[in-house]
Image (tube, grey):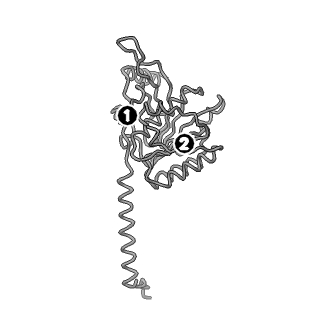
Amino acid sequence: MTAARAPRIPDGISDVISDLRERIATMEGVSARKVGCLAFGVPEIDAILPGGGLAHGALHEFAGGGAGTVDGAAAALCAAGIAARTKGPIVWCLTRPDLFFPALAQVGLHPDRVIFVESDKEEDVLANMEEGLSFGGLGAVVGELVRLPMVSSRRLQLAAERTGTMALAVRRWRRQTEANDFGQPTASTTRWRVSVMPSEDLPVPGVGRAQWFLELMRVKAGECAEFLVRACDDKGRIDLSPGSADRSDQTRRSVHSG
């Protein structure tokens, strides 16, 4: 019994296939260059993140440490500072037009870079986020959400992976009971919680730089951590506060003792 021979591909079709393969390889090369990480510029934080920063082409979640509006606003500003350090326009999807433009500019995100997309329902926010991520060419797509179902988060993650655009989901609650949804699993690459802390003391009377308690609640292929940081400056960058190391040591001791 003789083995069957593979059918011969005509020369013209073979050339077309070779050309397609070269185009696909080129496209994959472009995607590989686009996909990387956005470093915080804080060695202690970047060291615990796979790749040394927040991955482009991925979904990241941010929420306030409590159900109040103050912590929720801090989470939004933290996401805005990250978006400010990406390249390209920013699409911000929301249902409540309550963002304070001077506050966004204070953390480095100037309104002229932002395209605001307002919707009546959260389902539309999710759809608009996916559309923005699929479009490509954006620095980041931000969406303000109360709930983030697993299926929806997977769609956002896949859309971000296809174009290399960073997706930032800001979980903002309207009532205390909604905060419980943050404990539900999602497909996000990282999950952060931001709490407002007393401002940093100045050597002279005045208003000190705001401080946040930044908690990394979840990270794929990494470990959880927490930091006391100075809030984003006018370039979107955070700094480690002097008391952060002491707080981390206390946390580690409490975990080991437990």
Query: Vertical placement of 233 versus 115: above or below?
Result: above
Question: In the rendered image, which quarter contains the N terminus?
Answer: bottom left
Task: Name the residue located 35 percent from the left edge and 59 percent from the top edge.
Answer: 29
**Disc 1 marks which amino acid?**
Lys
Q: Which one is in front, 258 or 65?
A: 65
Q: Which one is in front, 215 or 29?
A: 29
Task: Single out the residue that lies furthest toward the front.
Answer: 112
**Looking at the rendering, which quadrant does residue 72 occupy?**
top right
Label 1, label 2: how many angstroms apart (C-alpha)? 21 Å
Left or right? Give the position of 116 relative to 248: right
Task: Name the residue located 38 percent from the left edge and 44 percent from the top edge.
Answer: 37
Residue linked to disc 2: 143
Report crowding for label 1: few under 14, some 14 to 19, many 20 or more residues within 10 A (C-alpha): some
Q: Looking at the image, tell me whether mark 1 or mark 2 is earlier in sequence order.
A: 2
Q: Which one is in front, 237 or 57?
A: 237
The disc at residue 83 is: none
Report crowding for label 2: few under 14, some 14 to 19, many 20 or more residues within 10 A (C-alpha): many
Task: Name the residue located 40 percent from the left edge and 43 percent from the top edge.
Answer: 86
Marks 1 and 2: which is nearer the front?
1
Element assignment for label 2:
strand
Picture coordinates of residue 236 (x, y %)? 40, 34
Left or right? Give the position of 64 relative to 105: right
Picture coordinates of residue 47 (x, y %)? 35, 36
Picture coordinates of residue 182 (x, y %)? 58, 35
**Disc 2 marks which amino acid?**
Gly
| Number of numbered discs overlaid on the protein picture | 2
Element assignment for label 1:
loop
Residue linked to disc 1: 235
Picture coordinates of residue 116 (x, y %)? 53, 43
